[in-house]
Amino acid sequence: MKHYPFIAFYLFCNLFIYVFKGSPWVYVACFLAFIAVVIWGSLNIQLSYFVQNITHKKTRKKEIALTFDDGPTKHTPKFLDLLKEHEVKATFFCIGKQIKKHPETFQRIIAEGHTIGNHTYSHSTSIGFASTQKVIDEIRKTDDIILQTGNITTDLYRPPFGVTNPNIARAIRKTKKKSIGWNIRSLDTIIDDEKKIYKRVTNGVKPGGIILFHDISEKTYHVLGDLLLFLKQENYSTFTVDHIIKSKQDD
């Protein structure tokens, strides 16, 4: 089912070639279109084109997951204070080198009952061009730091920038991780206006949704405060991502 758009594209190209057979430009156009589709599949984690990604929870219950990437940072303690005040648990996808910088904060995340995920060691902007072994090394290095610093293990992994490709997919399988995406992207690293971020997120809220935030700035902290009030008013509860996997195993 997840490949239906690409199967439809393949059938369309074959029909296009059949109707306009003989023209070399048809083949060029189809090749360029194919490249575009592959790029689309690489950048859109919700498509699960190269690897199966968990992007939401199948439920009719009014519940939602808060996830935070790229920490821990100097801002993370304030996020934790806010979550504690509202008695909400979240999932933190942590970068290995950030854990090394803020070990006490990382330990606090665990101590307060939040869920931890692996977000590579360096979060390199070139991760999409890395070899399978390089991605494996990034994941395993972070796994080691998580174990040494927090005395826990995790099978949750979120690809940096949501980028996937054959090398990343193989690395995920070889490290036996569950790839976690989202279906509500705050764009809090791109948008500066807090009201626009808040509106974008609240407009996307729906049962079983997974929200992508980053615990790296004051603006996201302020948006989170308003969002938690909104969720309470709308009678939404929260869940951590690991509960999706646990529920699937129980089925």
Image (cartoon, grey):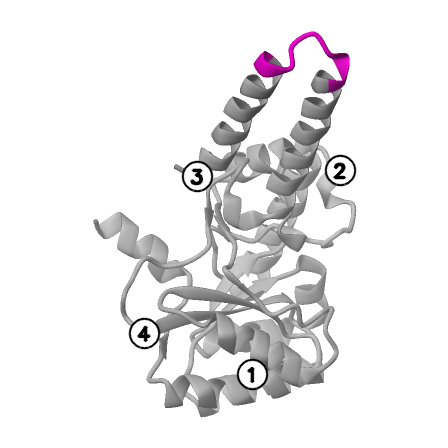
Please state if 162 lies on the left or on the right of 248 as rendered.
Answer: right
Of the residues tagged 1 and 3, which is closer to the observer? 3
Taking depth in this image into account, of 11 and 44 the one nearest to the observer is: 11
Question: According to the image, label 1 marks what residue?
Answer: 224
Instruction: Answer whether residue 106 is visible to the viewer in this image.
Output: yes
Q: Secondary structure at mark 2?
A: helix
Question: According to the image, label 3 marks what residue?
Answer: 2
Neighbor class of circle 3 (other Cα within 10 Å; few <14, some 14-19, many 20+) is few
Of the residues tagged 1 and 4, which is closer to the observer? 4
Question: According to the image, label 2 marks what residue?
Answer: 129
Cα distance, mark 3 to mark 4? 25 Å
- Residue 195 sits above or below residue 140 on the image: below
Whichever of callouts 3 and 2 sits on the residue coming sooner in the sequence is: 3
Q: Is residue 23 magenta?
A: yes
Amino acid type shown at disc 4: Lys
Q: Quadrant of residue 147?
A: bottom right
**Which residue reaches farthest top?**
22
Please provide percent x and percent y for residue 197: 63, 77
Neighbor class of circle 2 (other Cα within 10 Å; few <14, some 14-19, many 20+) is few
Please provide percent x and percent y for residue 172: 54, 40
Cα distance, mark 2 to mark 4? 39 Å
Q: Are marks 2 and 4 in contact (CB under 8 Å)?
A: no
Whichever of callouts 1 and 4 sits on the residue coming sooner in the sequence is: 4
- Residue 26 sits above or below residue 76 on the image: above
Cα distance, mark 1 to mark 3? 32 Å
Q: Are marks 1 and 3 in contact (CB under 8 Å)?
A: no
Q: Is residue 138 magenta?
A: no
Q: Are marks 2 and 1 in contact (CB under 8 Å)?
A: no
Cα distance, mark 2 to mark 1? 33 Å
At 43% across and 76% down in the image, what residue appears?
89
